[in-house]
Image (spheres, rainbow, N blue to C red):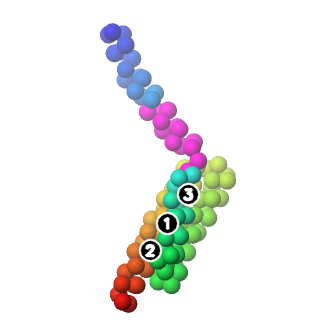
């Protein structure tokens, strides 16, 4: 039993490293999908009229994410996709606010 406990920290470290590696080598499919859906929600809310510059930045970042995904840089692709989603949320919120102010 003591022998098993002695190896416990090494086992935990190995499991953490395995999880980090798995995350780093997995294509960011969900993040890309989330970004696309959020951009569409921004468009549906009127971002092309009320927040065109922010929406354009989100689309550009999603394009960058797609390029990096094709190049195999999943970490950078994931980062770009997450940034695209954040900007799309901002564009949608701006659009919704502008629409409410007009009403």
Q: CA distance from mark 1 to mark 2?
A: 8 Å
Is 24 colored magenta in this rendering? yes
Which of pointers 3 and 1 lies earlier in the amino acid sequence?
3
**Which secondary structure, mark 3?**
helix
Displayed quadrant of residue 5 = top left
Q: CA distance from mark 3 to mark 2?
A: 18 Å
Q: Position of residue 99 (x, y in %)?
A: 40, 84
**Which secondary structure, mark 1?**
helix
Would you name the residue on which mark 2 appears? Answer: 92
Q: Nearer the viewer, residue 35 or 83?
A: 35
Circle 2 residues within 10 Å: few <14, some 14–19, many ≥20 = many
Q: Residue at x 67, y 52 (%)?
A: 71
Q: CA distance from mark 3 to mark 1?
A: 10 Å
Would you name the residue on which mark 3 appears? Answer: 32
Would you name the residue on which mark 1 appears? Answer: 38
Marks 3 and 1 in Cβ contact (< 8 Å): no
> Magenta segment, which residues?
16-28
């Amino acid at each position: 039993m003591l022998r098993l406990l002695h190896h416990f920290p090494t086992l935990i470290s190995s499991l953490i490293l395995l999880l980090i590696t798995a995350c780093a080598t997995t294509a960011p499919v969900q993040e890309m999908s989330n970004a696309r859906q959020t951009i569409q929600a921004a468009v549906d809310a009127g971002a092309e009229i009320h927040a065109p510059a922010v929406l354009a930045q989100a689309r550009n970042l999603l394009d960058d994410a797609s390029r990096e995904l094709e190049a195999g840089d999943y970490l950078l692709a994931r980062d770009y996709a997450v940034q695209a989603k954040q900007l799309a949320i901002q564009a949608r919120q701006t659009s919704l606010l502008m629409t409410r102010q007009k009403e």
